[in-house]
Each structure stands twice: as structure tokens, then as C-alpha cells.
Image: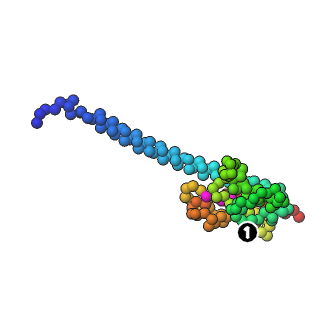
Amino acid sequence: MPYLSTKDRQRGATLIELLVAMLITAFGLLGLVGLQSRTAVTNLEGYQRAQALVLVNDIAQRINLNRKNADSYIADDIGATDPGTCTTVPGAARDLCEWAQLLRGAAEQRGSTKLGAMMGARGCVARTVTNTVINPNEYIVSVVWQGVQASGPTPLTCGTGQYPEENLRRGVSVVIRIGVLA
């Protein structure tokens, strides 16, 4: 066997080092792309939750402003269908109609497409079951919508069975207590 010098034995090592470096860089870039896509999903979920909180507070304020007729706001599955125009509807029915429009995304539109709300948003206003003797004027306002990534379903009953998968159903709620003055 002929004698190989050190220089001859190391020929090609630089090429192997370069290939290993490219492989490590490729895995790093794939990880970065995965992180970016996960960040986009998380940002969308956060945006939808923020929109839902705005809508829950909107109807809660409307109920507080019309305390005498708070029972008129009790409704289920608001926003599932287009309520049409709200200008001719009076009182609490008008508030619910306008809220349904907001749930359907009427706040932001591009042409006739409504973009300003969550995916598949629905709203519910119900009297709470607890403390009906102590405070009969206690209501729970809920907004549910379809999330992007599966997680645990919301414990809210609003919108149950209305989404393709219960693990995609998200929700926020607020309790409204109207004082009883004696």
C-alpha cells in the first residue's frame, strides 16, 4: 500500500464539513418556519379572543343601560343567521339585532364580505341558575366561536353542537348583576 501523506488523507474533509453545516442550517430553518406558523396561529387565536371580549362587553353595557328590560335580552344562538336591517326594530330587540350583526362581522367589511369578527361567532344571554333567590337579576352573557387549533372545549353551553369539533369551540363570558333596590 502506497504511503499517503496527511494532505492526501484529509482531501474531501472540507466538503463533508460543508454538507454537515448545510444540514444543520436546514434543520434550523425548518424549525424557524414551524415557529413562525405556530406564532401566526397563536396571534389569530389571541385576536379572536380580544374581539370576543369586546363583543361581550358591548352587549353587557347595552343590558346595563336598559336595566328595566333586562329579561328582553335573554336569547340563545344570536348571530347564527343574518338578522337583516336593525333600524326598524325597537328597544332590546334592536340591541340584539345590532349585536348579531357585530357577531357576524359587520364592523369591518370588504365589499359584501363581513370580516370583523371571529369564525362562526354566536352569542347567548341567559339568566344564571345560581343565586336566583338572592339576586334574581343575574345574567350570563357568552360569546363562542370556532378556533383554529384543537384544544379543550369551553365549559360554556352556548353554541354546543354547532361546530365541526367541540375541541375547536372557544368562548368567553361575563356575569351581569343588576341590583334590586328595596
**100 magenta-colored:** no
Specify the principal SS of the magenta part: strand
Say left or right for 2 vs 102. left
> Under tag 1, what secondary structure?
loop
> In which quadrant is the N terminus drawn?
top left
Which quadrant would residue 167 be assigned to in this image? bottom right
- Image height check: is 12 above or below 122? above
Where are the magenta residues, as a range? Answer: 142-146
Residue lying at the far front in this picture: please name it. Answer: 111
Q: Tell me the residue at 38%/41% (across/down).
A: 24
- The local crowd at label 1, few if under 14, some if 14 to 19, many if 20 or more residues have their Cα within 10 Å, is few
| Residue 60 seen in render | no
Residue 131 sits in quarter: bottom right
Going by the numbered disc 1, the residue's amino acid type is Val
Q: Can you give x and y, in whole percent of width and height, for residue 144 in the image?
A: 66, 59
Nearer-the-camera pick, 151 or 79: 79
Question: In the image, what residue occupies the spot 61% across and 60% down?
Answer: 169
Colouring rule applied to residues: rainbow
Quarter of the figure that contains the C terminus: bottom right
In the rendered image, residue 141, in percent from the top left (x then y), is placed at: 73, 60
Q: Is residue 36 above or below residue 87?
A: above
Q: Residue furthest left?
A: 1
| Relative image position of residue 4 (x, y in whole percent) | 16, 32
Q: Is residue 132 left or right of residue 11?
A: right
The answer to whether residue 61 is seen in the rendering is yes
Q: How many marks?
A: 1
Query: Would you say 23 lies left or right of 6 here?
Result: right
- The residue where tag 1 is placed is 129
- At horizontal 43% and vertical 42% (from top left) the residue drawn is 28
Q: Residue 77, image x and y in percent?
A: 70, 64
| Residue furthest right in the image | 182
Residue at (52% x, 45% y) in the render: 36
